[in-house]
Amino acid sequence: MGPSMIPPGSLALLAQGAVASLLLAAAAIVGGTGLAIVLAAGAFSRFAPVRAAYRVYVYIVRGTPLLVLALLLFYALPALDLRTGPYIAGTLVLIIYTGALFAEVFRGGVLAIPRPQWESARSLGLPPAAMFRKIVAPLVTRYTLPPYINVCVMTVKASSVLSIISVWELTLAAREIIERTFAVFTILGLAAAFYFVMCFGIDRLGRRLEHHLALKGFAGERA
């Protein structure tokens, strides 16, 4: 693919779209992580209705296509007189979606903690805050970091769905260029390359973080 085959200005526009996709994904990851912590705490609640609410939320969100969730929220917010615009609606959709995925990752990490670790912590008489800081957090980090990074990569790719509700990001930028230039394969190939670079970069950063935490005894490295 030579420079002469690329329509003028296309690379700059696609790069802007890639930045928009990364910003959407970053907002969703931060918001989804916060939501997931609350949800995962509900998964281990002593109250059965709270645990049931967690299961219902996760089943519904994970069982509904992201495209349908985006359309539902995009049209539901104005119907409730909440005129937020496509960007806020799109970010909320990603937060709702990633929150369910991250919550299951965290729940699995807590369940993976060996029973002797819990018994040792209780025998030491550690208060709940100290137990979380010294026992739960390091072990959950060790068990959940690889799947957490995978969900982060998925979030970048999932942001492309938001083009259906007019959120301008990489996919919508590519569509606009194609409509103007008809360079379908060239533009789609470039868009795919941008997505690959973003996802590969997140994966590499995740591996470096794993290595850094492994040196401190918090996590084990992937093979």
Image (spheres, rainbow, N blue to C red):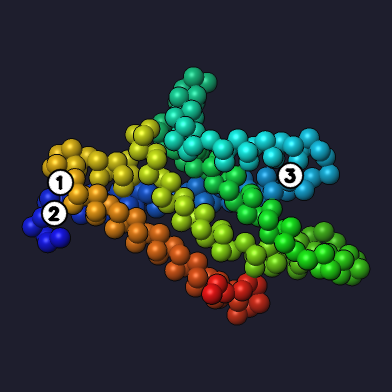
Q: CA distance from mark 1 to mark 3?
A: 50 Å
The residue that disc 3 covers is 42
Does residue 46 appear left or right of residue 78 in this picture? Answer: right
First in sequence, mark 1 or 3: give its number: 3
Q: Quadrant of the N terminus?
A: bottom left
Instruction: Report whether 137 appears left or right of 34.
Output: right
Q: Splitting the image into 4 quarters, where does residue 63 fall?
A: top right
- Is disc 3 in contact with disc 2, using a CB cutoff of under 8 Å? no
- Say whether marks 1 and 2 touch (CB < 8 Å): yes
For residue 7, above or below residue 57:
below
Residue ID for mark 1: 183
Looking at marks 1 and 2 on the same chain, the residue that comes earlier in the sequence is marked by: 2
Q: Residue at x 72, y 58 (%)?
A: 110
Q: Which mark is residue 6?
A: 2
Q: Is residue 182 visible?
A: yes
**Residue 81 rendering spot, x and y as whole percentages:** 50, 20
**Within 10 Å of the Cα at label 3, are there few (<14), some (14-19), or many (20+) other Cα atoms?**
many
Q: Please say if 19 is above or below 141.
A: above
Q: Amino acid at mark 2?
A: Ile
Amino acid type, mark 1: Ala
Badge nearest the viewer, 1 or 3: 1
